[in-house]
Structures are given as C-alpha cells and as structure tokens.
Amino acid sequence: QVQLVESGGGLVQAGGSLRLSCAASGSIFSIETFYWYRQAPGKQRELVASSTSGGTTTGSDSVKGRFTISRDNAKNTYLQMNSLKPEDTAVYYCAAILRITTNQAYSSYWGQGTQVTVSS
C-alpha cells in the first residue's frame, strides 16, 4: 500500500527556515510529479510547489524566491522554506502522481499533513 509521510513541520519565528520532507513508501513503479500544498485555517487548500520527474519545478507567486522544492532519485521530496512569514502558517501536504505498475494508470496520493506555524 502506498503511503506518503511528511515530516519537518514545527514552530518557527518569522524570518526563520524549515525543511519539510515527504517520503513515499510501498510498491511504487514511478513517481511522475510531487506536489506540496498548504491549507490555512478558514482558507482553501492551495498549491505551493511542484516537481516533475523531468526536472521541471514550479512555485506559487506567494513563495517564489523563498521556497524551493526538490526531489531525490528515490521516493522523497523536500520543501526548503526560507524567510518564513506568519502568513505561511498552515498545514502542509505532500501529494504525488504515481504508478504502482507499468500496466496501471497514474493515480494521486496524499500525505496526512504537517503543521507549520510561523510566529511574528
């Protein structure tokens, strides 16, 4: 069974940094795209960054220049968050588009989320 598990969240002062990690486990043939989303209280979930297997990365306007998504050759993705602001406070979710076998279509999977709180 495929699982995505985030780690690295916590409480940090404004201007500080955190590095989130997401580890995918289970029987996975390939991971096409990793995503990081976040959801603040009372707000809709928003896409923060993405990283494709081909090396293309994207970031939302609100985090460009501050957050960097990366992935390794295994089943992990990371979100380096610098110059954090109180408005970055949210639950951060990892998601992935992946295939379990070559014969199956790509499916999406989500982690359980990790809380990031930035104090002013």
Image: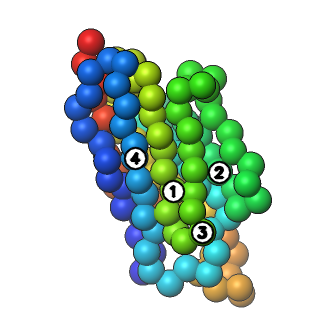
Mark 2 or mark 4, which has the lower sequence index? 4
User: At x 45% / y 80%, what residue is drawn?
Assistant: 26
User: Which class describes the residues within 10 Å of circle 3: few (<14), some (14-19), or many (20+)?
Assistant: few
Q: Position of residue 71 (x, y in %)?
A: 57, 57
Do residues under tags 3 and 4 come within 8 Å of each other at their CB atoms?
no
User: Which class describes the residues within 10 Å of circle 4: few (<14), some (14-19), or many (20+)?
Assistant: many
Q: Which mark is residue 51?
A: 2
Question: Label 4, on which residue?
Answer: 20
Tell whether 74 sits left or right of 4: right
User: At x 53% / y 33%, what residue is drawn?
Assistant: 67
Question: Label 1, on which residue?
Answer: 77
Taking the view exactly as shown, the residue that stands out farthest to the top is: 120
Q: Nearer the viewer, residue 87 or 83?
A: 83
Element under label 2? strand
Do residues under tags 1 and 2 come within 8 Å of each other at their CB atoms?
yes
Residue type of the residue flagged with mark 2: Ser
Q: Position of residue 81 (x, y in %)?
A: 45, 34
Residue type of the residue flagged with mark 4: Leu
User: At x 40% / y 46%, what residue is drawn?
Assistant: 20
